Image (cartoon, helix red, strand yellow):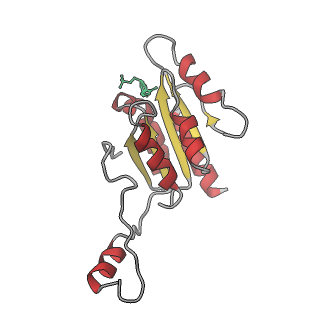
Amino acid sequence: MEIEEPGDGIGEAEIEQSGPGTATMPAVQEAFEEIEVDAPLVGVIMGSASDKPKMQPAGEALQDAGIRYDVRVISAHRDPDKVRDYCQNARMRGLRVIIAGAGMSAALPGVAASHSDLPVIGVPIAGRNLGGLDALLSAVQMPPGVPVGVVAIDGAKNAGLLAARIIHA
Ligand code: AIR
């Protein structure tokens, strides 16, 4: 699966004003060129590049199901503004489900659910010291009103399969 490093472009697309006298032909052309015909339906995000091997099965399950997805490394603690922008723009970009994987104090799934009303599937990643229990509890113990569905520790494959079921429901 293709993995993209965090970019500065997330959620930063400029929207041009249109109206009498404001829409020039080059601007219209640029706006239409920005339409993503094959926009992804699932956003796979993770807290660190070190999570990639554990998150890869989610991408494989989505690919097997023929569901387009994109991948970003964005940490709820290290890149809070990027996480907010990504999640707030997710529905507008056409995403239907967010899969969020993180280890240790895994805030990413909960923070994603606090910034988006899309279904969020959390994947607790096993770290070095606590076997993933830290991440599991961080992701699963969400306060009422901010739902996150959590799969097993290192359960990225099921996260991909569940996202496919949500999309096909
Ligand atoms: N993490 C990153 N930002 C917040 C958290 N909880 C997690 C990552 C990774 C772990 O911290 O998801 O599982 C260790 O990250 P790193 O980059 O030090 O390998």
Residue lying farthest to the right in this orientation: 144
Q: Quadrant of the C terminus?
A: bottom right
Viewer-nearest residue: 1 or 113 = 113
What residue is drawn where x is 48% and y is 40%? 58
**Ligand number 1: quarter of image:** top left
User: Residue 51, located in which quarter of the rendered image?
Assistant: top left
Residue lying farthest to the front in this orientation: 21
Give residue 25's position: percent from left, percent from top. 29, 86
Give residue 53's position: percent from left, percent from top. 38, 31
- 16 sits left or right of 163 in the view: left
In this view of the protein, can residue 55 be seen by the observer?
A: yes
Q: Quadrant of the N terminus?
A: top left
What residue is drawn where x is 57% and y is 47%? 163
Residue lying farthest to the bottom in this orientation: 20
Give residue 131's position: percent from left, percent from top. 51, 14
Give residue 167's position: percent from left, percent from top. 60, 55
In this view of the protein, can residue 158 be seen by the observer?
A: no
- Check the image and report above or below for 34 versus 133: below
Viewer-nearest residue: 53 or 47 = 47
Viewer-nearest residue: 91 or 66 = 91
- 40 sits left or right of 149 in the view: left
Q: How many marks?
A: 0
What residue is drawn where x is 45% and y is 49%? 86
- 15 sits left or right of 131 in the view: left
- Check the image and report above or below for 72 versus 76: below
- Check the image and report above or below for 45 versus 49: below
Residue lying farthest to the top in this orientation: 129
